[in-house]
């Protein structure tokens, strides 16, 4: 994974994160036309938000998602060259966005 | 470049975080999960950047890199889900979770609903969708890489959608279902990087609930999210479960539409053995 890093320091990084956060867009959380009745398997659609909260990481654990990561070395290098900023390259074995 | 980093130029891993210029000049590196340590390395990199030349900050004009990437098969006109999974229950280690993406072409994704959905219709979600989810995504990789299930291992799994609203081409629906993946560890998926050296008996069960909204005119989902809550039993060689943590224990998954940005086009963990002939192997 690659990250374009501004040469202006942490304050600039925070600004970058804010700008990207606004661009991320919302995600569906409310049932659309849902009856709110129990599913046949015993789980309740009305409790979907509660179920999600059991699994999802906290917002504080997802701050890194606000950065516009590129997922290929090539894309990162090209962006670094075009924007004249250093590149942060994150190299891990296993699934790159997972914990493996 | 990496040979100048924290692991030097010898054999072994090059995992870590590197700061570099566009021409590959090494600036700083580390391999740590400590955020404060990463910030220090970033500062070192920025300090070194100040001393680099303009030439070092540019890619050579004739530079190319072969585009051999799994994400070139990402079905951007189909359905791309992102998933999260975590251990549940009071004993769960909440610091560990995993995430993945599930890919479906537009034609495959149409299997969530019937041909002409009407309010009250119940539809058995296509076997292709159910199998893909149960085999490759409803697995225990919370703490590390695991193994997929074979089709026969998940044969009793089923998901149903119920249409709750139809407004022109917009169809709203609910999702419920149950999946079962169980194997005695016999590997039936042929030779691949995943082929285990020994048997790992294991099982994963889940119950599913969620909802979605589909636009018949564009063939696209405008909303889709569901959770799967269940139980895991057993372990695999690399999934991070010590022999004393083989369950049964609670586990859960969240699936939702992936936002449209590069990081959400990372290929599914099992992409190299996905049951999809439209995926182009870049190797």
Image: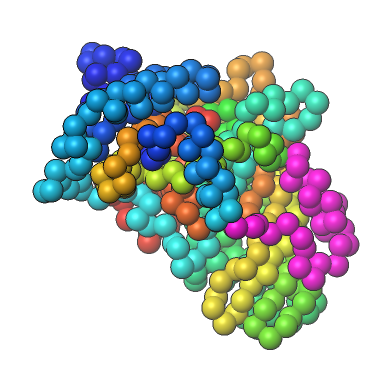
Say if the magenta span includes residue B10. no
Residue B14 spot, x, y in % from top left: 32, 22
Q: In the displayed image of the protein, which residue is found farthest to the left?
A: B62
Inspect this view and state whether residue B193 appears.
no
Residue B8 in the image, given as x and y percentages of width and height = 26, 14
User: Which one is nearer the viewer's eye here, B171 or B135?
Assistant: B171
Magenta stretch: give its range.
A25-54
Q: Which residue is pictured at 74% across the width and 46% down the height? A: A52
In the foreground, B217 or B18? B18
Pick whichever, B44 or B234, lies toward us.
Answer: B44
Taking A85 as reference, is B211 left or right? right
Which SS does the magenta portion mostly show? Answer: loop
**What residue is rendered at 20% in x and 41% in y?**
B58
The answer to whether residue A50 is seen in the rendering is yes
At 56% from the left edge and 23% from the top edge, which residue is drawn?
B240
Q: Is residue B247 left or right of residue B216?
A: right
Question: Which quadrant holds residue A70?
Answer: top left
Percent coordinates x, y for residue B151 in the rendering: 54, 50
User: In the rendered view, would you say A76 is above or below B221?
Assistant: above
The image position of residue B40, as x and y in percent, is 45, 19
Quadrant position of the C terminus of chain B in the picture: top left
Relative to residue B33, is residue B253 depicted above or below?
Answer: below
Residue B77 horizontal side relative to residue B170, left or right: left
Q: Nearer the viewer, residue B264 or A42?
A: B264
Please tell me which residue is depicted at 82% across the width and 57% down the height of the picture. Answer: A45
Q: Is residue A42 magenta?
A: yes
């Amino acid at each position: 994974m690659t990250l374009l890093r501004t040469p202006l320091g942490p304050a600039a990084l925070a600004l970058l994160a804010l700008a990207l956060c606004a661009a991320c867009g919302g995600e569906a959380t409310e049932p659309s036309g849902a009856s709110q009745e129990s599913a046949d398997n015993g789980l309740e659609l009305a409790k979907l938000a509660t179920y999600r909260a059991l699994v999802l990481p906290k917002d504080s654990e997802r701050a890194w998602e606000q950065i516009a990561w590129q997922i290929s070395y090539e894309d990162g290098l090209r962006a670094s060259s075009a924007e004249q900023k250093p590149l942060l390259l994150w190299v891990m074995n296993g699934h790159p966005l997972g914990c493996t | 470049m990496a040979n100048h980093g924290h692991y030097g130029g010898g054999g072994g891993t090059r995992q870590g975080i590197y700061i570099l210029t566009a021409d590959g000049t090494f600036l700083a590196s580390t391999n740590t999960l400590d955020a404060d340590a990463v910030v220090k390395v970033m500062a070192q990199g920025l300090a070194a950047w100040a001393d680099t030349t303009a030439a070092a900050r540019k890619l050579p004009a004739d530079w190319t890199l072969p585009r051999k990437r799994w994400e070139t098969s990402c079905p951007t006109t189909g359905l791309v889900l992102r998933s999260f999974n975590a251990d549940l229950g009071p004993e769960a280690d909440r610091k560990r979770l995993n995430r993945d993406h599930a890919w479906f072409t537009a034609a495959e994704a149409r299997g969530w609903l019937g041909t002409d959905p009407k309010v009250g219709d119940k539809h058995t979600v296509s076997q292709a969708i159910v199998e893909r989810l149960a085999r490759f995504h409803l697995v225990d990789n919370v703490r590390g890489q695991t193994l997929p299930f074979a089709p026969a291992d998940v044969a009793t799994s089923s998901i149903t959608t119920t249409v709750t609203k139809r407004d022109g081409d917009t169809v709203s629906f609910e999702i419920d279902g149950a999946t079962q993946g169980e194997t005695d560890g016999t590997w039936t998926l042929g030779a691949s990087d995943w082929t285990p050296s020994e048997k790992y008996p294991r099982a994963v069960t889940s119950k599913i609930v969620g909802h979605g909204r589909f636009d018949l005119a564009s063939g696209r989902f405008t909303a889709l999210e569901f959770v799967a809550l269940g139980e895991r039993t057993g372990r695999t060689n690399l999934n991070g479960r010590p022999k004393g943590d083989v369950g049964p224990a609670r586990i859960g998954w969240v699936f939702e539409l992936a936002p449209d940005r590069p990081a959400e086009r990372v290929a599914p963990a099992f992409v190299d053995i996905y049951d999809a002939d439209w995926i182009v192997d870049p190797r």
